[in-house]
Image: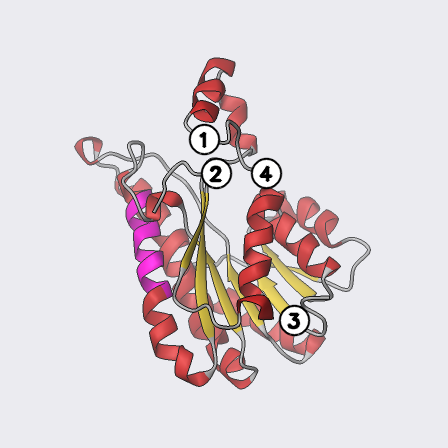
Amino acid sequence: MLLEDKVAIITGGNRGIGAATSKLFTKEGAKVVITYSSENSRAKADETIRGTDGIAVRCDVTKKDEITHLVDSTLSKFGQINILVNNAGIFVNHSIEAFDESAVDANINTNLKGPVLCTAMVIDELVKNQGVIVNTASVVGLAPSPISDIYAASKHALVGLTRSWALKFGPQGVRVNAVAPGLMKTDLLAEFSPESIKSLKAMCPLGRLAEAEEIANAILFLASDMASFINGQTLVVDGGRFMH
């Protein structure tokens, strides 16, 4: 198993990429701690870890005291932290000509401040254990977004942090990488018409949208020893939509 005896914190692990990653990590031998942000999402979190040794912890990643509780809960249960997956994120539409401060704050706080706080609170454990950080970015962290400028900016910043942290902590034995998912199947697609979904699929050379499990596979690779000499990179998983 690729992650035997490893302990992984996966933020936003109750749905989508986070849930798929949690299940895959567990299958590969890891002890998993996932976060959920509110009581409304607790049921999905509990379902994700049901039948495993993992735990679900309520945590708003924009609040330092809640992250402290997350770290304390993890160490109390498992005694170590080897992997941090900064996956919790939010997408809020925004364009500068229709400036909306609340949309700016939502994107920046969750997508940027959240990973910064989580990493700051976990880094000592990761250095001690020669651990790994994997950040969930986006293809619009490497290319412009026609839909939300601030979302793209937050993901560009996360790619920048990935590189800076890799440079900073690589000498201490901590690898830091990111995945950049393209268009994928999510519950948000319920708002799209069949014609719109068809158009989205047509943008991809593979002619389809990604499954959450396909993104999780990339996260597993980067978190495992298979990627032992990969550091500071952003792995694009978009079916060839953007060829970097």
Disc assigned to residue 239: 2
- Report, in whole angstroms, how far the alpha carbon at label 3 lies from the one at label 2: 30 Å
In this view, the residue in front, 177 or 202, is 202
Amino acid at the residue labelled 1? Pro
On residue 205, the disc is 1
Highlighted magenta segment, given as a residue range = 151-162
The reply to whether residue 131 is visible in this rendering is yes
The residue at 79%/59% (across/down) is 52
Please identify, in this view, whether the residue under mark 1 or under mark 4 is nearer the observer. 1
Where residue 57 appears, as percent x and y from the top left, is: 63, 60
**3D distance between C-alphas at marks 3 and 4:** 25 Å
The earlier-in-sequence mark between 2 and 1 is 1
Whether tag 2 and tag 1 are in contact, CB under 8 A, the answer is yes
Seen in the picture, residue 165 relative to 95 is either above or below; the reply is: below
Kindly identify which numbered label has been placed on residue 211.
4
Q: Earlier in the sequence, mark 3 or mark 2?
A: 3
Q: CA distance from mark 1 to mark 3?
A: 37 Å
Magenta part, dominant SS: helix
N-term mark: 1 or 3:
3
Q: Does residue 12 show up?
A: no
- Asked whether residue 158 is drawn in magenta, I would say yes
Mark toward the start of the polypeptide (2 vs 4):
4
At x 44%, y 30%, the residue is: 204
**Residues packed near mark 2 inside 10 Å, few (<14), some (14 to 19) or many (20 plus):** some
- Percent coordinates x, y for residue 174 in the rendering: 47, 77
